[in-house]
Amino acid sequence: MFGSDPHNQIAIHPVNQSGASLNEVSDMDIFRNSKFLITNELKDKVFSVNDVRHATYKVKTCGLNTLFSIKSLSSKLTCELSEKELEAEQLKNNFVLCFMPITDCVKYIMNLSESVNLGKAVEFIYTKANQLKFKQKPKQH
């Protein structure tokens, strides 16, 4: 869907390197006509409220107001606040934070597009994962 439109670009950044330049805000940035369209944090392990607040801060400093936090089957938020409470906290500051399990994210994207080639989508994900030297466990999901 996003990758097939010549006006869109998907940039997946190596782990712990997002924010290294002005063109890297989140783990997976999606651009349309060279402007930020969607920012996504990819969670594959235990993460804290400070991790979430740091990610939202990075997005806000670029003048954006939305962040998807896409969670793998093995990720978990460990803090005194729930995901819903963190989403509400950010919404009070005019910022939309959305936690989404990877399974729901894939279904959502598939429903947005009229013609997603699942084989090409999976191939794209694995190619990017290999290029960025992702660990084997996240690739298995």
Image (cartoon, rainbow, N blue to C red):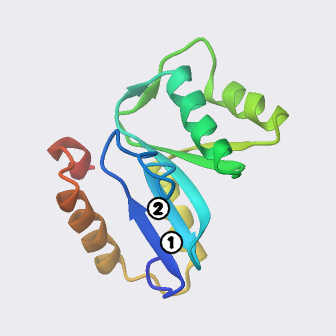
- Residue drawn at x 60%, y 11% as measured from the top left: 80
Report, in whole angstroms, how far the alpha carbon at label 1 lies from the one at label 2.
6 Å
Dot 2: within a 10 Å radius of its alpha carbon, few (fewer than 14), some, or many (20 or more) residues?
few
**Residue, far front:** 21
- Residue drawn at x 61%, y 48% as measured from the top left: 67
Q: Is residue 85 above or below residue 38?
A: above
- The reply to whether residue 1 is visible in this rendering is no
Task: Kindly check if marks 1 and 2 are in contact, taking CB atoms under 8 A apart as contact.
Answer: yes
Q: Amino acid at mark 1?
A: Met
- Residue drawn at x 68%, y 50% as measured from the top left: 66
- The reply to whether residue 40 is visible in this rendering is yes
**Residue 106 location, x and y as percent?**
46, 61
Task: Label 1, secondary structure: give it.
Answer: helix
Task: Label 2, secondary structure: give it.
Answer: helix
* Viewer-nearest residue: 57 or 124: 57
**Residue 69 location, x and y as percent?**
53, 43
Dot 1: within a 10 Å radius of its alpha carbon, few (fewer than 14), some, or many (20 or more) residues?
some
Q: Is residue 46 above or below residue 112?
A: above
Circle 1 sits on which residue? Answer: 110
- Residue drawn at x 19%, y 61% as measured from the top left: 131
**Residue 101 location, x and y as percent?**
49, 45
Residue 126's label in the rendered image is: none
Circle 2 sits on which residue? Answer: 106
* Viewer-nearest residue: 66 or 43: 66
Q: Amino acid at mark 2?
A: Val
